[in-house]
Amino acid sequence: MDRERAANEALGICDFDLVNSDNALTEAQLLTLKKDKDAYQEVKNFLNIIEDYSTAVHLGAIDEEAAYNMISVLLTRWVKLLRTFIDDRRVMLGNERIYGELERLCQVWACKMDEEDQESAAKMEQVKSEARRGAPRKV
């Protein structure tokens, strides 16, 4: 979380809030960020750490189910918000594999979250249907 705070503070120079933003970093914001080498490095460091975390999950050094329960929502959100930065690093370095473990893990977890959301919605619909019929709720 310290790295997230440092990255968020660095992103402040381009008027971007990693914690509260609903929209991804824009190209214009990325250009502003790139002008400040220290700020840019903080964001890069943050992504490198979560890439390392993703690699550790992939290799089994960190239990995937525990990791999913603890950080999946944040990790998938960070990747979505910093997509412009990630894509730019890939182009700059000429390597599509940059942050590959992070992206792979986010894709797996996003699918899992979607399935859980669908199951939850189906259960809620069943409860509503039973309530309309006057059926007693199962506890």
Image (cartoon, rainbow, N blue to C red):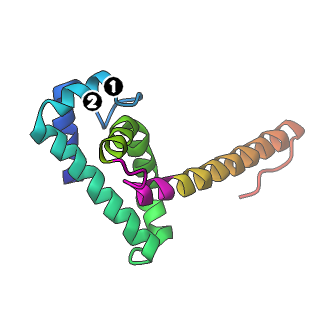
Query: For the residue carrying disc 1, how many other residues have a C-alpha within 10 Å: few (<14), some (14-19), or many (20+)?
Result: few
CB within 8 Å, label 2 to label 1: yes
- Element under label 2? helix
Residue 99 place in picture, x, y as percent = 38, 54
Q: Which residue is labeled 2 in the image?
A: 30
Write down the quadrant of residue 51 in the picture. Answer: bottom left
> Is 44 covered by the magenta stretch?
no
- Which quarter shows the C terminus? bottom right
Q: Which amino acid does the dot numbered 2 rest on?
A: Leu
Q: Which residue is labeled 1 in the image?
A: 27
In the displayed structure, does residue 44 sit left or right of residue 86?
Answer: left
Residue 100, compared with residue 11, is above or below; it is below
Q: How many marks?
A: 2
Q: Which residues are magenta?
A: 94-106
The residue drawn where x is 16% and y is 37% is 10
3D distance between C-alphas at marks 2 and 1: 5 Å
The residue drawn where x is 17% and y is 46% is 42
Q: Do we see residue 4 in this rendering?
A: no
